[in-house]
Amino acid sequence: MTGLNHSLERTIVIEASPEIVFRYFTDSFRWAAWWGAGSSIDARPGGRMVIRYPDGSEATGDVIEVRPPEQIRFSYGYVSGKPIARGASDVTIALESTDRGTRLRLVHRFADAAVRDQHVQGWRYQLSLFANLVANDLHGDPSGLVDRWFAALAEHDAALRLATLRGVAAPNVRVRDRFSCIEGLDELSEHIAGALRFMPGSRLVRTSDVRHCQGVALVDWAATSADGQTRGRGVSVFTLSPDGRIESVTGFWM
């Protein structure tokens, strides 16, 4: 595509593998989950791409290149012809694997600098939505993960406690709160054993829905004693790894 001398570039890091990220460019259901109902993509050279925006406007184009899970390229323009005619701009989305997941680089090429500038905030917003969408897909509802974590904190059987922790947390998990400065599953399991010995019957109980955003989960809890009375309250911040496990927990007592 010639004459497209003005480029808009955006780079973000998404904490998911390139394979997970790329499927949003090859699956119309996921494409529509990103862009909105009625959007679709036929991810093969010559296939049609459609984006239907909430205001009713529609962008469309043709897929030019597909290289899973590394790159997709398509033309982009509006059905109305304004501000870009059909096929009159070019979008390339490239993915690169990183230690924390995927570096996504978007390049949108235009014939007109003023039209390019009109799309800067739009892509900033849409890629932010995209990062959240992928994270929600990857982690689902973290409530079960958090509940298994709290269950492990109250487990007296050492083997079962360690097995539960291994199922939900990274080997080098970090735990910080008023009474903890712990790193690693084995150290954590021993720390829990000590707490159960000196505070028998105590446990943490989740008291709120889990709020999740891009691999960070927030949850309220109550500390109860053996008689069932609430002895304290707090909130914990869980950081989730790209493979869906807990990699750190920071607790704040109220």
Image (tube, grey):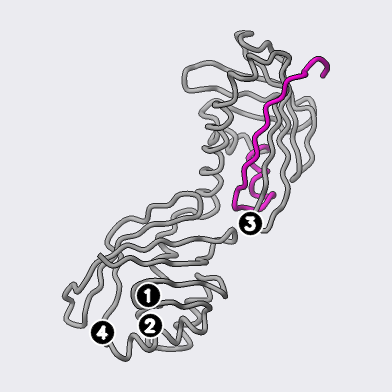
Tell me the tag on residue 151.
1
Q: Which mark is residue 155?
A: 2
Name the N-terminal-most of marks 1 and 4.
Answer: 1
Residue 30 highlighted magenta (yes or no): no
Q: Please, is residue 73 above or below residue 200 in the view?
A: above
Measured in 3D between alpha carbons, the distance from the residue under mark 1 to the one under mark 4, in whole angstroms, is: 13 Å
> Residue at label 4?
201
Q: Position of residue 207 (x, y in %)?
A: 27, 62
Residue type at mark 2?
Glu
Establish if 227 lies above or below 91.
below
Q: Residue furthest right?
A: 2
Q: Residue at x 50, y 48 (%)?
A: 136
- Residues packed near mark 2 inside 10 Å, few (<14), some (14 to 19) or many (20 plus): some
Q: Nearer the viewer, residue 171 or 143?
A: 171
Query: Over which residues does the magenta segment extend?
Result: 1-25
The relative height of residue 89 versus residue 222 in the rendered view (above or below) is above
Q: Earlier in the sequence, mark 4 or mark 3?
A: 3
> Residue 100's mark?
3
Residue at the (37%, 71%) spot, across then down: 177
The disc labelled 1 sits on which kind of residue?
Ala
Sequence order check, earlier mark of 3 and 2: 3
